[in-house]
Amino acid sequence: MAERIVSEMVANVWRVMVAPGDAVAVGDPIVILESMKMEIPVESPVVGTVSEVLVAEGAVVQEGDVIAVVEQMAVVE
C-alpha cells in the first residue's frame, strides 16, 4: 500500500532528507520545509520504503502538494 505524504502548508523545500529506495520508520524526516524563517520537518507516518520523491530543494510547495510516496510495509500478525 502506498502512502502519499503531502505538504500541510505553502513553504519552500529547504532540504530533502530521503531518496527513492531509502527505508523509513514512523517519524523519520522526509523533507524539511521553510516558512517565515521557521524550519518544519515533514515526517513519515508509516514504516516502509520511499518509492518517489516529488520535490527538489529550493522548490515551493502548496498546501496539499504530494512531497513523496512511501510503500508501506505489510504488517504480519
Image: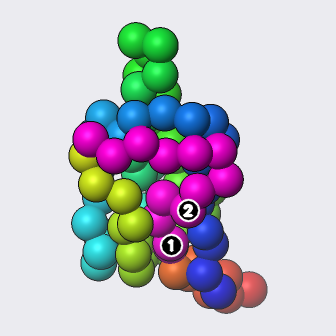
> Which residue is at a point 27% across and 41% down the rendered structure image?
58
Q: Closer to the observer: label 2 or label 1?
A: 2
In the figure, is residue 76 to the left or right of 71? right
Point out residue 36 in the picture as x, y percentages from the top left corner: 47, 13
Q: Is 65 in front, or is 51?
A: 65
Residue 24 inside the magenta-drawn segment? no
Q: Position of residue 51 (x, y in %)?
A: 40, 80
Q: Nearer the viewer, residue 55 or 77?
A: 55
Q: Quadrant of residue 18?
A: bottom left
Q: Is residue 27 visible from the viewing direction of this image? A: no
Which label number is shown at residue 9? none
Front position in the image: 36 or 15: 36
Q: CA distance from mark 2 to mark 1?
A: 11 Å
Instruction: Residue at 26%, 66% (x, y): give it.
Output: 19
Percent across and percent down for residue 65 are: 58, 56
- Residue under the point 60% across and 81% down: 2
- What segment carries the magenta color? 58-70
Q: Residue furthest top?
A: 37
Position of residue 71 measured from the top left corner of the image (x, y, whole percent): 52, 80
Q: What amino acid is found at the position of numbered circle 2 in the picture?
A: Val
In this figure, which residue is indicated by the disc labeled 1?
A: 70
What residue does disc 2 label? 66
**Front residue (pair 35, 72):** 35
Q: Looking at numbered disc 1 in the image, what kind of residue is underneath it?
A: Val
Left or right: where does residue 41 sit relative to residue 14?
right
Magenta-drawn stretch contains 61: yes
Asked if residue 11 lies left or right of residue 65, the reply is left
In the depicted structure, whether residue 37 falls above or below residue 24: above
| Quarter of the picture holding the C terminus | bottom right
Q: Residues within 10 Å of mark 2 (few under 14, many from 20)?
A: some
The colour mode here is: rainbow
